[in-house]
Image: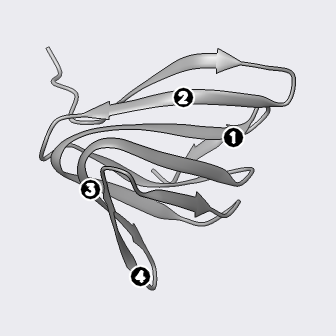
Amino acid sequence: MEVLNRPQLTHLEIGEKLKVLQIQASANMGMPEHSSSHEAVIVVQEGKAILKTKDTNYILKKGSTMLVPAGLEHSLTVLKDFKAVAIMATDSIINFKN
């Protein structure tokens, strides 16, 4: 049986123009490099993670927000049990590099 080491993504709400995803992960989990077809807003509810781009590492922690531009390739490394919501266009597609 394969053990998944990626955050769990759950659709909380899907509206006419926006959707809200819950991102939940334990420490040491991560998401490989990916991008979204539309910009997204990340709102961190608990924990701590590093969002890595080609040029910069951003620390995401409880209470922080981040606007992730469309097409920006990034990965996520969870440092402390993590919970956040991602708000994006209903037709957004997450594209994983591998």
**Marks 4,2: beta carbons within 8 A:** no
Q: Which mark is residue 21?
A: 2
Q: Secondary structure at mark 4?
A: loop
Q: Which residue is mark 4?
A: 56
**Marks 1,2: beta carbons within 8 A:** yes
Q: Secondary structure at mark 3?
A: strand
Indicate which disc, 1 or 2, sits on the residue closer to the N terminus.
2
Indicate which disc, 3 or 2, sits on the residue closer to the N terminus.
2
Locate residue 58: give its quadrant: bottom left
Q: Amino acid at mark 2?
A: Leu
Indicate which disc, 3 or 1, sits on the residue closer to the N terminus.
3
Q: Position of residue 91 (x, y in %)?
A: 79, 33
Q: Amino acid at mark 1?
A: Met
Looking at the image, is 17 positioned above or below residue 31?
Answer: above
Closest to the observer, 56 or 32: 56
Closest to the observer, 22 or 52: 22
